Image (cartoon, grey):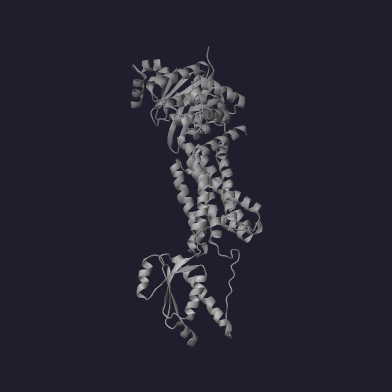
């Protein structure tokens, strides 16, 4: 049984003047998949992601996200995706509850939905005691989990995670990936960029970008076989060195 | 609309929870207007002076009494001779010395001519000038009284009447300026800082990825500051009317409309700054250097535009504050209506549209 494709990218290119930041990349992501989007700094990861989430217009090429065109239907894309940035961007001077209410609000959730979601979320993350505290006073790991949950408030089809585990300790990272698995099992597609190669092993499929191009795209197991490597770390270094 | 309301509520949380910006918003206007109103003024009051009277006759005594009675001066000491003058200045108490020559009364009667010398401490040239003008005025007045008895065939008596601000109150000049500066500061600086803060924290990105339209994000950031600026303008106008007894000759409605217009002009400048700056610090520096300084120096707030070099006079035309100050003075002091300030109003509207168009263009380039 083939699952439906939720992200469809063909020859997508982004030029800044003469510089090709993203050079004709093509790939597909299936529903419920955890898709790892890897690459060194400056390889074009962020630019690609920005085109997919509708805040940057491609120069040429085709792409649809959740069935919507990245040129014409960015509004529809935005309604159907969640996004978590590497800064865990929540408002530090708002309480946990206020943050949830605000982000639920801008995604158009009704007051009743927000109330239910807030209660659910606070219970799931064990935040009962601190729900009225300012987010700024929370440890980084908690912020990260909260930020992830907030990005999922409106039940998006796809969630984009931009280096979601930066600066977080290994135990919290482990817990975070458990949350990711749980979310993927419920049918949400995960599109994640990361610098940690051990995390790449957790993904269903991984693409590796080098200088604006996708140089490799397969399951971690196949990639390791192909490059004759023990770990994803070796795969990455072999590719990036070329 | 509901999304929008949530956004504005969030914005008020930011302002309310940041004690520093709260102080800038409401403490500064009151402090500034009080400072400018009470401390910084062109008027003189009870200035300490000394007298060196060589003749000590009835006429000099009469003049001294007149000077003392004027309330502008208070005579601190009587200096015995020229050598003591410098010492007296050095003590730093007196600002001027009045010297009457020998046989003052006699000379006045015989030659119709006697000399009073005024020596003023010009370390502060403005005050020195004012002091000498005031003393001159008192002397002229006295002369005029003497001449009443004698008929002089030809005589020109200038009668100066100061209109719109008959008591020459400095505060009337400062209030419109301070109000302009505060509105500029609150509207332009605070909005540009609050927008760049979201950029710095990365929340701006999250907002742009949300279904909220980019234009609504910006409007949502700006609306609270429109509201706060209106409160500020009201506080300043109330203070100037009730504390400084500044008249409001024209229509309050027109004044309110023009103030809102200027607030929007400043906000559009704030938005423009935030499209250029990427950090709160840069936003603040640009606001201070590119907005506040020219506003203070070139708007006619402190230094009259007509006495500037031509090149600066030309530059002053692009300062929005200049036009708003003209409008404010017109409405509050002269009581004119829109038919007299329509030109300035149109200039402000034009500037606002220009700033908004420029910001939209810059903003789009960033998104491309």
The answer to which of B175 and A165 lies nearer the viewer is B175
Residue B44: x and y in percent read 49, 65
The image quarter in which residue A21 lies = top left
Q: Is residue B188 visible?
A: no
The answer to which of A240 and B24 lies nearer the viewer is B24
Circle count = 0
Q: Looking at the image, is B135 positioned above or below residue B320? A: below
Horizontal relation, residue B149 to residue A85: left or right = right
Residue A129: x and y in percent read 49, 23
Where, quadrant-wise, is the N terminus of chain B in this rendering? top right
Q: Looking at the image, is B41 positioned above or below residue A188? A: below
The answer to which of A2 and A127 lies nearer the viewer is A127
Residue A12: x and y in percent read 48, 29
Q: Is residue B157 visible?
A: yes
Horizontal relation, residue B128 to residue B235: left or right = left
The answer to which of A39 and B136 lies nearer the viewer is B136
Q: Looking at the image, is A70 positioned above or below residue B42? A: above
Residue B40: x and y in percent read 49, 58
> What residue sits 52% from the left and 14% below the top?
A2
> What residue sits 53% from the left and 61% below the top?
B170
> What residue sits 46% from the left and 45% below the top?
B284
Task: Farthest residue to the bottom: give it.
Answer: B110
> What residue sits 51% from the left and 42% below the top?
B22
């Amino acid at each position: 049984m083939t699952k439906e494709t939720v992200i469809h990218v063909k020859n997508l290119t982004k030029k800044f003047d003469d510089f090709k930041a993203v050079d004709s990349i093509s790939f597909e992501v299936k529903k419920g998949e955890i898709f790892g989007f890897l690459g060194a700094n400056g390889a074009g990861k962020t630019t690609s992601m920005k085109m997919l989430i509708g805040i940057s217009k491609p120069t040429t090429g085709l792409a649809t996200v959740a069935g919507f065109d990245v040129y014409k239907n960015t509004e529809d894309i935005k309604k159907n995706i969640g996004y978590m940035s590497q800064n865990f961007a929540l408002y530090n001077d708002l309480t946990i509850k206020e943050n949830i209410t605000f982000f639920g609000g801008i995604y158009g959730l009704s007051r009743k939905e927000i109330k239910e979601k807030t209660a659910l979320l606070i219970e799931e993350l064990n935040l009962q005691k601190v729900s009225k505290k300012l987010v700024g006073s929370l440890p980084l790991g908690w912020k990260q989990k909260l930020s992830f949950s907030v990005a999922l408030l409106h039940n998006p089809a796809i969630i984009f995670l931009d280096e979601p585990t930066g600066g977080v300790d290994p135990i919290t990272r482990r817990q975070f990936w458990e949350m990711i698995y749980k979310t993927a099992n419920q049918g949400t597609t995960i599109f994640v960029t990361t610098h940690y190669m051990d995390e790449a092993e957790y993904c269903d499929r991984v693409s590796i970008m080098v200088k604006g191009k996708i140089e490799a795209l397969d399951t971690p197991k196949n990639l390791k076989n192909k490059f004759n490597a023990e770990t994803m770390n070796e795969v990455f270094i072999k590719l990036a060195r070329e | 609309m509901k999304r929008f309301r949530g956004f504005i509520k969030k914005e008020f949380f930011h302002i309310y929870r940041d004690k520093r910006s709260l102080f800038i918003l409401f403490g500064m206007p009151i402090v500034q207007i009080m400072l400018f109103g009470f401390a910084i003024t062109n008027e003189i009051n009870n200035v300490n002076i000394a007298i060196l009277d060589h003749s000590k006759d009835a006429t000099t005594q009469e003049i001294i009494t007149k000077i003392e009675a004027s309330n502008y001066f208070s005579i601190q000491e009587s200096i015995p001779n020229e050598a003591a003058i410098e010492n007296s200045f050095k003590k730093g108490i007196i600002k001027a010395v009045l010297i009457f020559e020998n046989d003052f009364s006699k000379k006045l009667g015989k030659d119709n001519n006697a000399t009073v010398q005024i020596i003023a401490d010009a370390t502060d040239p403005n005050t020195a000038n004012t002091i000498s003008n005031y003393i001159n005025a008192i002397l002229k007045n006295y002369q005029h009284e003497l001449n009443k008895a004698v008929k002089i065939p030809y005589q020109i008596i200038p009668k100066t009447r100061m209109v719109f601000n008959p008591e020459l109150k400095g505060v009337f000049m400062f209030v419109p300026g301070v109000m302009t500066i505060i509105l500029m500061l609150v509207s332009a600086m605070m909005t540009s800082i609050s927008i760049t803060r979201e950029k710095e924290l990365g929340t701006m990105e999250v907002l742009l990825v949300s279904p909220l339209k980019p234009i609504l994000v910006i409007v949502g950031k700006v609306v609270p500051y429109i509201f706060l600026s209106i409160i500020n303008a009201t506080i300043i106008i109330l203070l100037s009317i009730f504390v400084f007894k500044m008249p409001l000759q024209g229509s309050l409605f027109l004044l309110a409309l023009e103030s809102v217009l200027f607030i929007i002009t400043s906000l559009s400048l704030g938005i423009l700054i935030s499209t250029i700056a990427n950090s709160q610090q840069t936003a603040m520096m640009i606001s201070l250097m590119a907005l506040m300084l020219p506003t203070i120096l070139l708007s006619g707030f402190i230094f009259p535009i007509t006495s500037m070099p031509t090149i600066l006079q030309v530059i002053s035309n692009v300062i929005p504050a200049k036009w708003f100050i003209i409008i404010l003075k017109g409405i509050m002091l002269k009581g004119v209506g829109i038919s007299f300030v329509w030109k300035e109003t149109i200039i402000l509207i034009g500037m606002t549209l220009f700033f908004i168009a420029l910001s939209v263009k810059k903003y789009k380039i960033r998104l491309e």
